[in-house]
Image: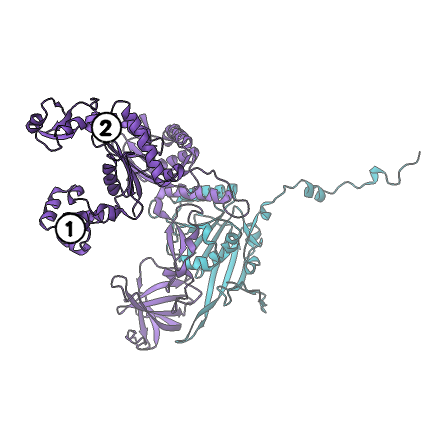
Amino acid sequence: MNVRTLVVLCPDWPVIATAASADEAVAVIAVNRVMSTSPAARVEGVEVGLRRRDAQRRCPALQIVDPDPDRDARVFASIAALVDRFTPRVELSFPGSLAFPTLGPSRYFGGDELLARLVASEIDEALGSSGWFDAVGVGVADGIFAATRAAELAVTEPDHVRVIPSGEAAKFLSPFPVSVLGRPELADVLHRLGLRRLGDFAALKVDDVVARFGVEGRFLHRLARGIDDRPSSLGPPPRSFDAESVIDPPAERVDIAAFAARIVADDLHNRLRAEGLACTRLLIVAETDAGERLERVWRHEGALSSTGIVDRVRWQLDGWLNGPSAQRPSGGVSRLLLIPDEVMPARGRQHGFWGGETEADERAGRALARVQGMLGVAAVTVPERRGGRGPADVVVRAPFVGIDGDEDRNRGSAVDAPWPGRVPSPLPTLLPSEPLSIEVLDATGAPVWVSGRGTLSAEPSTVKFDAAVRNGISIAGWAGPWPCDERWWDQLTHRRRARLQLALSDGRAMLLQIEQGSWSVEAVYD
Amino acid sequence: MVLPAALPSSVPPPSLKELAERIRPVVLARQAVVPVVEPLQRLLPDGGLIRGSTVAIGGVGATSLALQLVAAASQAGSWVAVVGLNDLAPSAVLEANLDAERIAFIDPGNSGRQVDVLAALIGAVDVVLLDARLLLRPSEGRRLASRLRERGSILVVVSPGGVVNSSLSADLSLTVGDAQWEGLGRGHGHLRSRRVCIGVDGRGRASRTARCELLLPAIDVQVATAESEREDGTVVAFIR
């Protein structure tokens, strides 16, 4: 997606940054080639790319300056500060060029054209105060590539502004030489192919470009077509809220570590609150003096308070320091690090009045989070309706993440779907975690099996849980087989089986399944 | 001077019984009862689950009975935590009308920390279903029992098809037996209902042993109110 972008470009920036006056002939020369020149030098015939000796021959009075990217960037920061007044989302491309998306500022200042004029006059004034009039161009177009091209042209315009209407980037770019793509090797090849303009290159079929030039060729082809979808690094710079505490001497006991955690947690909480943020996911890292490290991510649907953070630190360390001896660290905790993994605007939090979250829910949520601290996050699960035929598919266990954070956990189209052929209600209460193999025998003691057409080979009469036992348990009633051929379109998850419901003479009832010729207990009605 | 017709001295002093009524605490332990579904009310000596008590359930059908026992509490807004019982089918839990939003399954695995887990849960959740196969030492059992009484949670110890855990002395123990399934023929039909006989035994008010026949589960989706008194005095209730 093209982002409407404004680009400010000062093509002579390396020279401007040297603080030379505009009417002097100055050139920045790097590795024996002219990198940037002042207008006065250009008049004398000094061009970018010229060798040092040729430049000096054309303009004997030429002042030669060595390049200094740090200086360029340092001086350009003052220009960036000017633009900061229009938008906070300024992206510095390189010294002499910056960009920002126009969406918000443009609406505020009355359109792209007006915004660009304001920016241009502001910068031109600032540069003009040191004699550098007409050294800036402002271009607005869809995407940073087209906007940069527009800014290049804008330098020579009287008002230093060039706005390309939305949707016309491709048309605008088509007369440019292919060399503006900034890939000399590609430009060379395209030249030899007779494609001299971006328009010619853009007219090629994508497939052909990819076949010949690969992924990079495809990217440049998109640029030439006016599609500029480079990921934007715009936005406020990420701030780090990490809080750290070094515990010296190392804490051997949980309460000592928790005390240290309270100070860090308060600090973290205050800094987040100053920004109007609240932490919903927190990574707690504890390190011992022996270099062992325990990391755990904590999630909380309502934002974590500083007491909440301390509780979690305590639970986590409790699970570690007082856990089974095999997992216990060899030394005390020497360093605690709290990293807010997910923050959101703090909206405050209130208990439900009618329905919704209650205090009991919160208490239970805290206890469950604490148990997660002892046993690991995966040890606490909640039911989640999925929909399906077998008793194990209808509802599955999903990891507990927090109270009322996943409201649509038990909804979805699959849940209410009819699922023809599902196991009838009442559902079995026990699902053996490992399939328990069983033998189903007919009256003569021969194994019973299910044919490919879904019929039993004989009437089942007894079952044996253990092949070594002489007499099996007799069957009081049975129903089935219920063939079930699921996900036949997918090789990996395809299951073809038949189910058999059994009531045994001792009062037990179970659901058997036969899969690939062998019977097993799928579920027990207890 | 005319004396009032009734002299103050003529008011009879309040009897001890009346005094006891006046000074008794607002809620007796017997009154802190968590409701159960209607057919189970006549099974339990107090008509419900008493807060702070331990209930042990064993026998073939123990899982179904345990789920039914806590279903009404869950519907009334109580949290239920299931510790252990890793083979318990979540589909059956929801089918037994437990609230999916207020239940959590906890798998202590072989961490050996089931006591810590239980201690954290007791008081925070109203009902804890505990797998009887998780071993507790007698001292730990006593500690948990006193914590239970203090915090008012209910511990239901389930031993599916097995014997009741001895390290936790239960206030009430229910044993399911004589299961008979109905609805399944020889090659036709499907399991519909099960007639079970439940033996009740316990301490205090529950010390009189009672037996009761139930349909667990019953055919209807709703809790059936139909019941019949049999000649030997046992009541058949229908539960589902």
Residue A11 lies in what quarter of the image?
top left
Percent from the top left, x then y, of residue A20? 20, 22
* Chain with colour cyan in the figure: B
Q: Quadrant of the N terminus of chain B?
A: top right
Is A458 in front, or is A31? Answer: A31
| Kind of residue sitting beneath label 1 | Gly
* Secondary structure beneath label 2: helix
Whether residue A120 is situated above or below residue A521 in the rendered picture: above
Residue A272 lies in what quarter of the image?
top left
Q: Mark 1 — residue?
A: A214
Is A427 in front, or is A184? Answer: A184
| Kind of residue sitting beneath label 2 | Ala
Q: Are marks 2 and 1 on the same chain?
A: yes
Percent from the top left, x then y, of residue B110? 33, 47
Q: Chain of mark 1?
A: A
Percent from the top left, x then y, of residue A235? 33, 37
At a point 50% along the width and 52% down the height, the residue shown is: B74
Q: Is residue B8 left or right of residue A443?
A: right
Kindly identify which numbered label has been placed on residue A64.
Answer: none
Q: Is residue B191 left or right of residue A322?
A: right
Q: Is residue A78 left or right of residue B54?
A: left
Q: Residues within 10 Å of mark 2 (few under 14, many from 20)?
A: some
Residue A518 lies in what quarter of the image?
bottom left
* Chain with colour purple in the figure: A
Q: Mark 2 — residue?
A: A73
Colouring of the image: by chain
Q: Chain of mark 2?
A: A
Whether residue B162 is situated above or below residue B5 in the rendered picture: below
Q: Residues within 10 Å of mark 1 (few under 14, many from 20)?
A: few
